[in-house]
Image (tube, grey):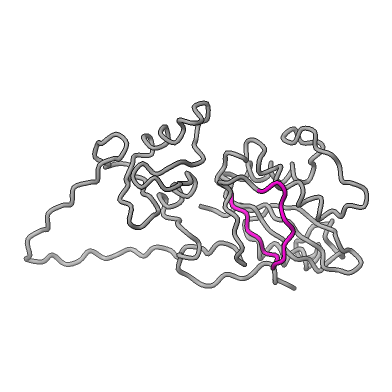
Amino acid sequence: MALRAVYLLRSAHPRHGGRCYVGFTRDPGRRLRQHNGGRGRGGARRTSGRGPWEMELYVYGFPSDVAALRFEWAWQHPVASRRLPGASPRRPRERPIAFALRLLPRLLRAPPWCRLPLRLRWLRPPPRPPLRPAPPPHVVVEERAGPPRPRPPRRRRRPAPAADTPPEEATPPPACDVCGEPALAPPPLRCPRPRCPMAAHPRCLAPLLLRAEPRQLLPLGGACPRCHAPLLWGELIRRHRGEGDDDAEEGAEPEDPAQATT
């Protein structure tokens, strides 16, 4: 899944303390270098000459560029956005960075983003300003430096030479824990708990998790039908697509965009 991040920059210059900038990128580290390099290196007009800039955080997990760009625009223009009815402008003597952080929880709770499996990644070292109200429970808050690790390209395996040993018996497919039918195609959703053998068709598990929200199209989460542990729909889909956890991916250590400079 391509990274689509809406980021928040904070100026570290003594004369421009409290200034911030909201933008969209597919590569946080590269984009921060551009901002610190000025307009001649791809930076924005509003950040040129007001650096150095540090990346406070970014929100990612958007299903499309359009969804991320609309989130960016609403964060930049909260009073004009229809997604934030009743949004008040910046208070007197309130710093722009404090105003942006005050708006972020409201954006995460506003439709349509409140139904998306978004993640918020802090890049600012602690102590961090609290977000009030807190982000929705299904929004995963991360405190690791650097963007998600890219997955290494898969290598094609050469077919093994035929052996004279008899073929092993095929393992029967697991049964769906919701409907009881064999979970053949598509591959079933699995509980992330290692000891839980739950397997379910996506078309079966989604209605089960939507029983408390029958008017919604996609669930946010619910309880595992086998071990009854809490599940997040976004995490199930990520694992189903082979994305898993960023720390579990192999590959080179990513660059920390919070420390990127010219």
Q: In the displayed structure, would residue 54 be above or below residue 214?
A: below
Name of the residue lying farthest toward the front: 228
In this rendering, position of residue 243 left or right of residue 141: left
Residue at figure coordinates x 51%, y 63% from the top left? 150
Percent of width and height locating residue 207 = 42, 32
Percent of width and height locating residue 212 = 49, 31
State the extent of the magenta-drawn residues as a range. 118-134
Percent of width and height locating residue 99 = 81, 50
- What secondary structure predominates along the stretch shown in magenta? loop
Residue closer to the observer: 155 or 129: 129
Residue at figure coordinates x 52%, y 30% from the top left? 216
> Is residue 123 one of those drawn in magenta?
yes
> Is residue 161 one of those drawn in magenta?
no
Q: Quadrant of residue 248?
A: bottom left
In this rendering, position of residue 197 left or right of residue 97: left
Percent of width and height locating residue 192 = 40, 53
